[in-house]
Amino acid sequence: MSHPSPYLLECHITEHSPHLLYLVFFLKEEKMGNKQTNCRPNYFSRFLPEEQAEIDGLFTAITGGLETISSGKSKKPFPIPISLEMLQAYLGDALPEKMIVRLYEGMRNIDLTGTSQSPSEYVIKEQFVILMSELLKGNAREKSHIIMKMLRVPIENVKASHIKEFTEDLITSVVHVLDYRNELKGWNMKKSQDFTSGVKALATQLLSALKQEMNPTQQKTYWDFDGDRNWTSPQECPPVEEEDSWSCDMSLIEDWVLKVPQISSFLNVVLRRGFLVLHSHAELASFIPECKDAKELMSLLNIPAILYINSFLPTKLQHTWKLIFSSQIHGYSFAKLCGNIIDKGPCLLVLKDRDGYIFGGFSSHSWAVKGQFQGDSRSFLFTISPSIAVYTYSGYNDHYMYLNHGQQTIPNGLGMGGQFDYFGLWIDHDFGKGHSKANPRCSTYNSPQLSARENFELDTIEVWAVGDFPSEKSPPKKNILDNNTEVHCLLEMIGKSRQSEGLRDPCEEEETKE
């Protein structure tokens, strides 16, 4: 007696009988001699043995156990399939409802038969494993394949607006789950800038790479340098179309996932911290930095901006941010600012002007008072509000960082990029004033004007030391030149070093310590 057609059976009964869904696949394997199953990739093999045990345990925990299915003389235990209600009950408040539904849609729309039939409302273990495998271990193509299913619209109808909505949900879910699991590492959502605007700003920034792929004629929309380091004028750009008119196909999404590594990182966090699976993985160790010495601070930063900017720092500096200066705490004094940031290692400066724009820069080296530029090409400028972006080294010059104070012959203040009187970011020694001159762009970082006005009035500033905070050292005994900083700066300007530097008598240093 022949078995009924498994495909016909599936169409009629699995929608209302989840346990029979496994009977369908059991019959398929029997009838086809397991050929169809064996020709599919073994997604489970991507996980280490201990990881496989975790995935097995997770599926069982969501569904509640195994079900024994009988077919004639054969009996075989199968895991109970997942329903949306089971997934919601297991995850609870760990993830937002919208993301739980997206994950469920991503699983149940995985086509195991290749027949493109309407998906069942139940998720079997193989679909669950495929989603976990492709999002956690897969390449850009595999991840984009699942993302397209999580959009909850037919592939042929996917627009840029759907990708933007997904990206906003993804960022929101990352911050939500870290907050829910008490893993924000000292950052307080109630003591930071507006979260919702931060999510929208970051989603817009991450989506910019996709928009460039969809509109290649708009990729060059600003002034740039030619081969002779001369400014070139911007190309004429066609009018920007509405997002709903931009269609996205699989290749565009794949390129986007490849070019924007934050998407993969965010998916990693949502799955690992949402399901509490594979949570010992080292990938998440420096995802968000530990916040130190800022308990009383109402920070200029928001959590999405922290995640984004931290991803541009050198890896060894991503684990800790320590507040070393805040005008809200330490007052409005340029001398105090200098005293708090000199010799403190790489730093992030974050400023807010009187018009509400928030921006800043990363200094790759310790700040030092000297009459010449310092730092290296790892330094960058950035904006946080009203839009978020990072502007890295252009290759044009080496004017990364500049700090001077107390001299009459050279500019006094703190600057990054550009040149004297035309810095990409400048804080005057007067402290209440600054400028961001970028006509048409800052030469060092190819950044636009960061502030609302070219010459701005400073409202608030905070500085964070990043990475390992340098240990405090007792200063060596001073000589006569140490007290004459003007002479010291002039020597630096003409490229002359002090011959006695580093050759002082160790005994003198010991006396100073005592």
Image (cartoon, grey):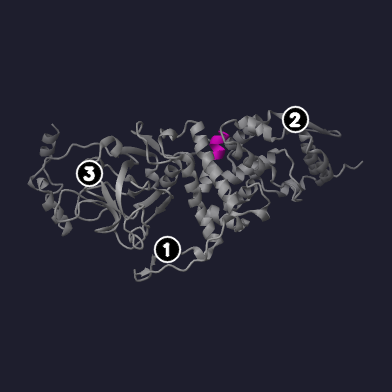
User: Looking at the picture, how far across and down is residue 191, in whole percent?
Assistant: 40, 34
The answer to if 276 sits in the magenta stretch is: yes
Mark 3–mark 2 contact, CB under 8 Å? no
Q: Earlier in the sequence, mark 3 or mark 1?
A: 1
Residue at position x 29%, y 44% from top? Answer: 345
Closest to the camera, between mark 2 and mark 1, is 1
The answer to if 9 sits in the magenta stretch is: no
Give the labeled residue for mark 1.
222
Point out the stretch of residues depicted in magenta.
270-277
User: Looking at the picture, how far across and down is residue 469, in whole percent?
Assistant: 30, 38
Give the labeled residue for mark 2.
67
At label 3, the amino acid type is Phe
At label 2, the amino acid type is Glu
Give the labeled residue for mark 3.
334
Mark 3–mark 1 contact, CB under 8 Å? no
Q: Is residue 452 left or right of residue 99?
A: left
Location of residue 56 with respect to 202 vertically, above or below: above
User: Which quadrant: the N terminus?
Assistant: top right
Q: How far separated are the C-alphas under marks 2 and 1?
A: 62 Å
At label 1, the amino acid type is Tyr
